[in-house]
Image (tube, rainbow, N blue to C red):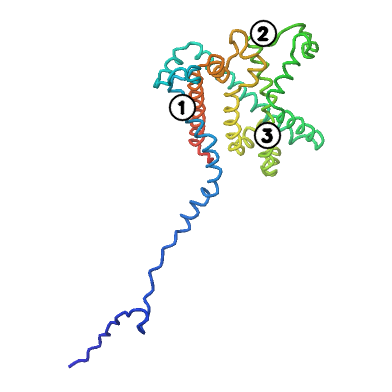
Amino acid sequence: MTADTTTPRKTPRRPGAGGVTARPPRRRRASPALRSGWTPWLYLLPALVLLGGLLVYPIYQLGLISFLEYTQAQVSGGEPTTFQGFGNYATLFRDSQFWQVLLATVVFAAACVLTTLFVGCALAVLLTRIRAVPRLALMLAALGAWATPAITGSTVWVFLFDPDFGPVNKVLGLGDFSWTYGRYSAFALVLLEVLWCSFPFVMVTVYAGIRAIPTEVLEAASLDGASQWRIWRSVMAPMLRPILIVVTIQSVIWDFKVFTQIYVMTNGGGIAGQNLVLNVYAYQKAFASSQYSLGSAIGVVMLVILLAVTLVYLRLVRRQGEEL
């Protein structure tokens, strides 16, 4: 007979009975990738909560009012609020003045954005070419214009171009020419004021980006015989593309919703509303005419347009392989 060499299994014993205590199963820790994926959101959580309270709820109220019949009668409680569906939007889209104002807003905003980007980028390059004292003076002047409140700057510009007391007409020899009387001259005057208070943001941001470019790259392009325009177009602009995306989107949002400059400098939209933009048009509908629902509908349309423009622009950038 052969001996049984099989080792007998040990029966686990209960704790306290003299046996070995069985270890509880270990908890599986979250993987480092999972923890690192949630970490940025934890840091952003306070800001997201704050932005949610400041943005999401007002946008919800704006959209809600745009679907209601909400005039002064409903505000005062004289009549009940009724649901209109898309009736306010249908009324708005049937209004020929709305389409005229929308076209004027798009053209005016595009002119402001292009002019601001051109002047801001040109002055940013200039800052890298001048000495310390002139650079400091230009920076202080630009930051002073940037820090000036819009209503203050608009009032000053109206005085400067005043047909009776303004120094600009006297220097140019224009006599009693009124800049705010004609439609295009009024838009041009507002464009100059918007440019004056907007270009410092582009200039400072692009200048910081240029300073981050290695000097060896710019020196190599200059030694190869490239002109300043060629260096900007072929070297600086591609390397500054993420920064240019940010300043472009910011400029589009700011210039599309201009209100203070138009309202102050053209006295509420110009003669017979010839200088109206969407923001001023919404203000007139909501507060001057007490049609709060129509004003809210205009606000929703502006929000959708800005979101669409931003998303399309970002999509075009992503197609070019640029990481944001």
Q: How far apart are the alpha carbons under marks 2 and 3?
A: 47 Å
Residue count near mark 2 (Cα–Cα under 10 Å), binned few <14, some 14–19, many ≥20: few
Picture residue at 80% right of the left edge, 38% below the top: 132
Viewer-side residue, 21 vs 156: 21
* In the image: residue 94, left or right of residue 233: left
In the image, is residue 209 above or below residue 253? below
Give the number of the mark in front: 3 or 1: 1
Picture residue at 52% right of the left edge, 13% below the top: 100
- Where is residue 273 shown, x and y percent of the image? 58, 10
Residue type indicated by callout 1: Gly
Q: How far apart are the alpha carbons under marks 1 and 2?
A: 36 Å
Answer with the quarter of the image where residue 249 lies.
top right
Residue count near mark 1 (Cα–Cα under 10 Å), binned few <14, some 14–19, many ≥20: some
Q: Secondary structure at mark 1?
A: helix
N-terminal label among 3 and 1:
1
Residue type indicated by callout 3: Ala
Q: Which residue is mark 3?
A: 226
In the image, is residue 295 above or below residue 242? above
Viewer-side residue, 294 vs 114: 294
Instruction: Pick the quarter of the image with the N terminus.
Output: bottom left
Residue extending farthest right:
133
- Where is residue 146 shown, x and y percent of the image? 70, 30
Q: Which residue is mark 2?
A: 181
- Where is residue 17 shown, x and y percent of the image? 35, 83
